[in-house]
Image (cartoon, rainbow, N blue to C red):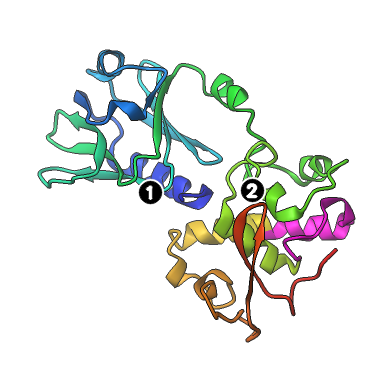
Amino acid sequence: MPELPSVEIFKRFLESTSLKQEIQSVKANNPEILMNTSRAELTDELRGQEFIQGKRYGKYLFAQLKNNYYLTFHFGMTGYLKYFQKESHPYIRLQIEFTNGYKLGFDDMRKFGKVWLTRDPEEFLKEKKLGPDALEIDFKTFKKLFRKRKGQLKPLLLNQNFVAGIGNLYADEILYQSGIHPLSKADKLDEPELRLLFNEMKRVLNKAIDYEDRIDTLPSSFLLPHRYLNGECPQGEALKIIKAGGRTTYFCPEHQKLF
């Protein structure tokens, strides 16, 4: 499932390929992905317009149009953007064709992604009750989030209403780099441990973006390239697999402390 690093990369891809090009036509090949809008409304508001910038918040991408509407994407499990001219792609769920003959496609094999048309990203995010963006939050706010929180740490990091953008893979990585067991209780972390978790969250997410979210190319000191059955952590210790909040979780019992 695309997490914050992937969506940041999609934002940069949108901005590098699709800005300031007049939209000629819109095809919603699978209208069931459209939320709070219709094929007709989408066509009316996009045709003749152009994208002027992209914005990301958590796992959501907002593509701002010149008329100040925002085409808003959530990429589900398999969604991503393609920019192409003549190729045929069987999983394009939404296609935007520009007057230069190129197309921007929302490709999503499993059709779990969603698309909205919104006027106000702030109101949209408020309705979704999202927590602060994991890359934008400051430590003071981060520390405040943990007040009166007593649940297990990994499910808390996965809760988009707590902090937005972290998914199953990068939660495992952040906790590994922090040396914290995924079942640790949130209220057991003191300020230095919270500071470490905060710093590693930022470092891991930024490093993933730098490496274009390609897990096989991440530094050897990262857990994710070793995150498979019978894998070993970068320090050579056997990884253990458990369920945390119902999600498959990899961790190193020799390296990650239970609080």
Element on which disc 1 rests: loop
Q: Is residue 198 visible?
A: no
Task: Report which quarter residue 238 is drawn in.
Answer: bottom right
Can residue 211 be found in the magenta stretch?
A: no
Q: Is 174 situated above or below 33? A: below
Q: x, y (%) of residue 100?
A: 13, 33
Q: Are marks 2 and 1 in contact (CB under 8 Å)?
A: no
Q: Which residues are magenta?
A: 181-200
Q: How many marks?
A: 2
Element on which disc 2 rests: helix
Q: x, y (%) of residue 30?
A: 26, 31
Q: x, y (%) of residue 226?
A: 53, 76
Q: Amino acid at mark 2?
A: Leu
Q: Residue at 38% of width from left, 49% of height from top?
A: 78
Left or right of 88 on screen, residue 239: right
Q: Toward the viewer: 91 or 20?
A: 91
Left or right of 256 on screen, residue 160: left
Q: Which dot marks residue 158?
A: 2
